[in-house]
Image (cartoon, rainbow, N blue to C red):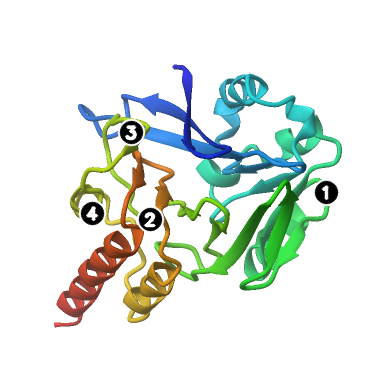
Amino acid sequence: METRIAEIASGIYRLSTFVPQIAPPAGFTFNQFLVLGDEPLLFHAGLRRMFPLVREAVARLVPPERLRWIGFGHYEADESGAVNEWLAMAPHAEAAHGHTGCLVSLNDMADRTPRMLADGEVIDLGAGRRLRWIDTPHIPHGWDAGVLFEEASGTLLCGDLFTQIGDGPALTEADVVGPAIAAEDLFGFSSLNPGMGATIRRLAALSPRTLALMHGPSFAGDGAAALRALADDYDRRFQAAMN
């Protein structure tokens, strides 16, 4: 395996590792996102077994020991598995996550006390780079779930939202909603609940210009329209499940 690097928005780099053994024959990507600034942030710590690959990719962009923040959408192996490896490598780094994730997992599991983020709280990386934490409980799964929105570039670091299979381009303007619907049909990974549509439409109100997917290509275009279409599909699924 190798971890490939691509700049998907100004100063935001996608670090992508393709694993053909998952969901064959299409395979599956695991993506981290490095956001540069005076205090660089890595979104998704990644799996522990992938740590050497991702560390090498980060080192091609910035000395790993300079990392200041380690974020992720929810506490799960592919999102947070290597958090302590990163904390050991970067002596000034802190994990940053929402209240629920810190209280139920990170306060105990992280080797250093994490920064607990309130809904809407901003991490200022310097150099004009600000990331806003937004709580999205149970969406797509995990009661501690949330996303980060990079305000300067309009990039939504959306975690498992829009998950799709395959090894597409690093950045696409093609449809990401249809492939996400197909992946939901295949995996059934989302926690269907009556608030899904409303929560996702709240993200659409940000009008993101780039959607940074953890599993699949990043999307450049009308992120609000894509989020509204995804919300409509989850509303449909919930209503079908209730009937």
Disc 3: which residue:
28
At a point 31% along the width and 57% down the height, the residue shown is 222
Q: Which of the two residues, 204 or 3, is positioned nearer the viewer here? A: 204
Whole-Å distance between the Cαs marked 1 and 2?
28 Å
Residue bearing mark 1: 112
Name the front one of labels 2 and 4.
Answer: 4
Q: In which quarter of the image is residue 191?
A: bottom left
186 shown above or below 131: above
Q: How many neighbours does mark 3 have within 10 angstroms: few (below 14), some (14-19), or many (20 or more)?
A: many
Q: Quadrant of residue 228?
A: bottom left
Q: Which residue lies furthest to the right in this view?
A: 91
Q: Residue at x 53, y 39 (%)?
A: 10
Identify residue type, mark 2. Leu
Q: Distance between the residues labelled 2 and 4?
A: 10 Å
Q: Nearer the viewer, mark 4 or mark 1?
A: 4
Mark 4 to mark 3 CA distance (whole Å) = 17 Å
In terms of secondary structure, where does tag 3 sit?
strand
Question: Which residue is tagged 2?
Answer: 161
Amino acid tagged 3: Phe
Which of the two discs, 3 and 2, sits closer to the camera?
A: 2
**Which amino acid type corresponds to the residue marked 4 in the rendered image?**
Val
Q: Which of marks 4 and 1 is nearer the N terminus?
A: 1
Q: Distance between the residues labelled 3 and 1?
A: 31 Å
**Left-right relation of 242 to 11:** left
> In the rendered structure, are the residues bearing label 4 and label 1 in contact, judged by CB atoms less than 8 Å apart?
no
Above or below — where is 3 with respect to 209? Answer: above
Callout 2: helix, strand or loop?
Answer: loop
The numbered mark, 4 or 3, whose residue comes first in the sequence reads 3
Q: Kindly identify which residue carries mark 4.
A: 177
Label 4 and label 1: CA atoms lie apart by 38 Å
